[in-house]
Amino acid sequence: MRVVGVGEFGGPEAFRVFEVPEPHAGPGQVRIAVRAAAVNPTDTYTRNGARAEMLSKHPPPYVPGMDVAGVVDEVGDGVSSVAVGEDVMAIVVPVGGHGGYSEKIVLPWESVVPIPRGATHVEACTLPMNGLTARLSLDLMALAPGATIAVTGAAGAYGGYMVQLARADGLTVIADASDRDTALVASLGPDHVVVDGLADGSVQNDQIVPAVRDGGVIATVRGWQADPGRGIRIVPVWVREYARNHVALDVLRQQVEDGRVSLRVARTRWRRDRDRARVAGRSRSWHPHRPGVGAGVRAQPRRTRCAPPAGGRWPRQSASGANIPRRERGGGARRPRGRRHARAPRPRVLTPPAPQTLTARNV
C-alpha cells in the first residue's frame, strides 16, 4: 500500500509517496481504508525533524497524520463497536511509519467511532484530534458550570471546538479573534468577542497570564509550563492521553449530530481536478498529497487499459451512439502500429457538492 511521509527531514518538498507492506487487524483492532486525512500544524514536527530524536528509534519513512476517516475493511477478534463496511473516523497517534497519511491503517477499536450522521469523510476527519484536545482541556481545567473561560485562536479548529464544547458545559465563553474572523467566531456562540480559565489555542503563553484571575487555570497545547504566580495553574494538554477514550470520542460524534458542535473544514486539496467528482465515500483510497490546512486528498486513480476491438480498429460513434467504421467516416489519423493497448475513455467529471462547513483558516 502507499503512504505519504519523509525519508529525510525538510520542508514540504521532503514529502514522498512510499510503498510499504499492508497491515492487518489483530485482536481488538480495526483496519480502515482511509478516504480522508486531516492535516494539522502538529504534523509539521514529523516532517521538519523537530521529533527526530523520538523517531530515531524507528526506520523511515516517517508518516504524520493524527485524524482519518474512511471505511472499515477488516476487524480483529473481540471487536463489536464497528463492522466491516461502516463509515468511521478515528484519532491516530503517529509512530514511525504508522500515521494517518496512509491508504490503510490499523488502530485500537477504542480510537474508532462511526462518523456523525450526515457528515462526509472530509468533514468527519477534522474532528477526532482537535475535538478530543478541546475535551481533554476542559476536563483538566475542571471549571464549574457558570465559570468564565477565555479562548484564544477561537477561529481555529481547536479554538472553535473549545468555544462550542465550553458552551455545552454551561461555561461563559470569551473568545478572541482577528478582525477578519470576528463574524466566524461570533457564529460559534461565545458570550463575548473582544476570567476563571483560559484555553490558549493561539499559543501566546505568558502574554495571556494577565487576563486570568488569581487562582485561575490556563490550558496550553504546545507544552508551555511556567509559574505565573497568583495561584494560577498551568495544565499542559496532550491529546495522546485521550487517544483511546472511546466514550469521549463517541460523545463528540453525538454532539455533532445534535447540532451542538459544527465540523471544522478549512479547505480540501485534491490530487487532480477530475478527482473532485469522486467525493468522500465513493473513491477507493485517499492520502494527503501536499501539506495544507484541513486537507483530505485522494490518491491518483489507476489508469484503466483495454484491448482493441476485433479487427484492430478503434471506431468512433455517431450522435445516436452507433459505431461508424473508419472506411465510412473518412479521414482521421491511425493509431501508431505496434501499440497493443490504449487507455479507456475517461469518465465524465461532475461537480461535487459544496462542503457543509467552511472556515477561514485552521490554527
Image (cartoon, rainbow, N blue to C red):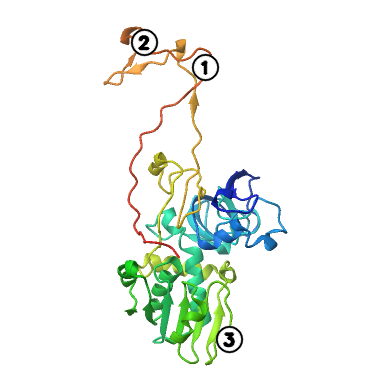
Residue visible at 33% across and 43% down? 351
**Residues at marks 1 and 3, CA–CA distance in whole angstroms:** 74 Å
Q: Is residue 92 visible?
A: no
Tell me if residue 323 comes above or below residue 270 in the rendering: above
Residue that badge 1 annotates: 339
Q: Position of residue 100 (x, y in %)?
A: 56, 55
Name the residue nearer the viewer: 231 or 27.
Answer: 231
Is residue 64 rendered to the left or right of residue 346?
A: right
Amino acid at the residue labelled 1:
Arg
Where the N terminus falls, by quadrant?
top right
Q: Which tag, 2 or 3, sits closer to the chain's start?
A: 3
Residue 71 in view here:
yes
Residues packed near mark 2 inside 10 Å, few (<14), some (14 to 19) or many (20 plus): some
Q: Nearer the viewer, mark 1 or mark 3?
A: 3
Secondary structure type for disc 2 = helix
Residue at 38%, 42% (x, y): give it.
277
Q: Which residue is mark 2?
A: 326
